[in-house]
Image: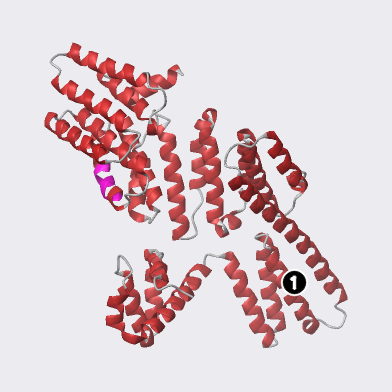
Amino acid sequence: MRGKDHLFYLIKSLSKSEKRYFTLDAQKSGRKNSRYLALFQAINQQEEYSEGPLKKEFGKKLGDDKARLYEAILRAMRDYQSKKSYKTRIKELLTDAKILFERKLLEQAENRLEEAKSLALELDDHLSVLEINLRQRDLIKRYLDKNYSDRVKELIAEKEKHIQLLQQEMGLHDSYDLLSIDVLRYPQRLAEEEINKITAEYEPVLALEPEHIDSFHAKWRLHRFLALYFRLKGDEDRVYEQLQETIGTWRNQERLISEHFSLYVGDFSNLLSATFRKTELLDTLPQLLEELKAHEAPNYQGKTFLFERISIYELIYLLNAPKESIDVPLENVAKGLKNYDISPSSRLNIHFNAILLLFLNDRFEECLDWLTRLRPLLKKNKGLRRDIHEVSQIIYMLAIYCLGDFEQIENTVRSVNRYFARLDKSNLNDFNKLLSSTIQQLQKSSSFRQEREILNNLKAKIEALNSPVLAGLDEIAILWIDRILQDKPIRQLRSEGRRKR
C-alpha cells in the first residue's frame, strides 16, 4: 500500500529534463491527461507535502488522480530510460518477438530474438539468455522443417552452460551478502581464532581462481568478496589489490559500465578511498580521477553520483597536494553544486572541503564567501555533520583575522565564543578558547616582539596537545601562526613542509 507522500517523493526525485519529458508526454496524450498534469504541477510546487490544499483543489477524486499520475510518471520514465538502457532494449526485443510470433511472422521473430541474445551475451546477462533460449525453442518447432534436432540440442547445451554460469554468479553473490553480515557483526579487527573460523567457512570461495572464471559478473563478485574478506582480516594491502582487480574487470566493458553505472562508480570510489589511505600512492589519484571522468553517465542520477564522487576525492587530493592549481576544480565544484541535487551530507562535505582548500591557498575572501554560503546549509541541516558546524566557526575566525579588519575581528571572536557557549558539549570548546583568547591578546599587543611571544606561546601549547584536533585544526592553526611569524603564504609553508618530509 502506497503512503500518501509517495507520489510527492517520486516527483521530487525527477531531474529537470525528466520533468520536462513527462510534461511533454502528458501534453501529447490529449485533454484527458490535463487533470493529472495539473496535479503534477501542483505537487511539484510544494516544498513539503501537504494533502489539504490538494483536496481543496482536486476534490474527492484526488486519491484516484494520484494513483493514475503515479503510474503515468513511471510509464513515462520507462520510455525515457529505454533509450539508454540495454536491458530495457532486450525486454523490448522480446516483446517484439512475441508480437511477431503471434502473427506467424516467424523469421522476423527469430531476427529479434537473435538481436536480443547478442545484446544479452554482451551484458553477461544469463537470465535473459535463458529466457531467449526458451523462446527460440518454441519458435523453431514452427519455423524450421521437421529436421530441427541439431538446433534443439545446441539450445539445450547453451541452456546448461548458462545455468552453470548463473549458479556460480549467484553463489558468489550469496557469499558476498553473508560476509557482509559478518562485517556488521565484527566492526573491530578480528582475533586470529575468529579469522580462522571465517576462513574455513568460506574456503570454497577463497580457493577460486579468477583467471578460470569466464563470467564477468562472477569474476566481479569474487574480487568484491575478496576485498571484503581482507578488510575483515585487517589486511589493507590485499584490500587495495582486490579493489584494483575489481576495477580491472570493468575496463573495456563500456556497455556494462553504462548499464550498471552506479555500481561502477561505487567500486571506483572504493578504490579512490583505498588509494588515498596509502600515502605513497597519493600521486596516482589524478590519473584514476581522469579515468573516472572519461565515462559519460547515462542519466541524471548517474551524472549526479559521478559529480559527487569526483568532487569529494578531487578536493581531498588537492588538500594534500599544495602545489596543484585549484581554480578549474573549484569552478567545476561550484557549477555542479548548482546543477545537481546531491544528498545534504555530501553537499556539506564538498562545500566544507572547498572552504578548507581556499583557506590553505591564502584565498581568504573567497573562503569567507563560501563560508557565508555554507551557513544556510548548516541551518537547514542542524542535526547533520556537527563537526562541520563547529570547525567552520573556527576557520571563519582565522580567515577574518588574516584579512586584518580590526573591528570585524572583535565581532567575529565574540560571535564564535557565543556559538560554543550555546553548545551542551563540544570537543572543540577548549581549542576555541585557546585560539580566541590568543586573537584577543594579539589585538591588544603593542609591538611585533610581543605579538611573536603570544604566537610562539600558542604554538607551543598546540604542539603539546595529547591528541590530534578535529579536522586537523591543530595543523591548520600552526600554519596560520607560521604565516604570521614567517610572513609567508600558507601555500608556500605547506610546499616547504612537504619537501622536508
Residue 362: which quarter of the image?
top left
The x and y percentages for residue 17 are 39, 65
* Residue 209 visible in image: no
Question: Please, is residue 404 above or below residue 132 in the view?
Answer: above
* Of residues 388 and 423, the one drawn nearer to the viewer in this rendering: 423
Q: Which residues are magenta?
A: 370-377
State the SS at label 1.
helix
* Of residues 451 and 138, the one drawn nearer to the viewer in this rendering: 451
On screen, residue 1 versus residue 479, left or right, reads right
Question: Please, is residue 371 above or below residue 141 in the view?
Answer: above
Instruction: From the image, tell me which residue sits under label 1.
Output: 133
The x and y percentages for residue 442 are 18, 21
Q: Badge 1: how crowded within 10 Å, few (<14), some, or many (20+)?
A: many
Residue 33: which quarter of the image?
bottom left
Question: Please, is residue 314 above or below residue 493 in the view?
Answer: below
Residue at image location 49% in from the left, 73% down from the top: 79
Q: How many marks?
A: 1
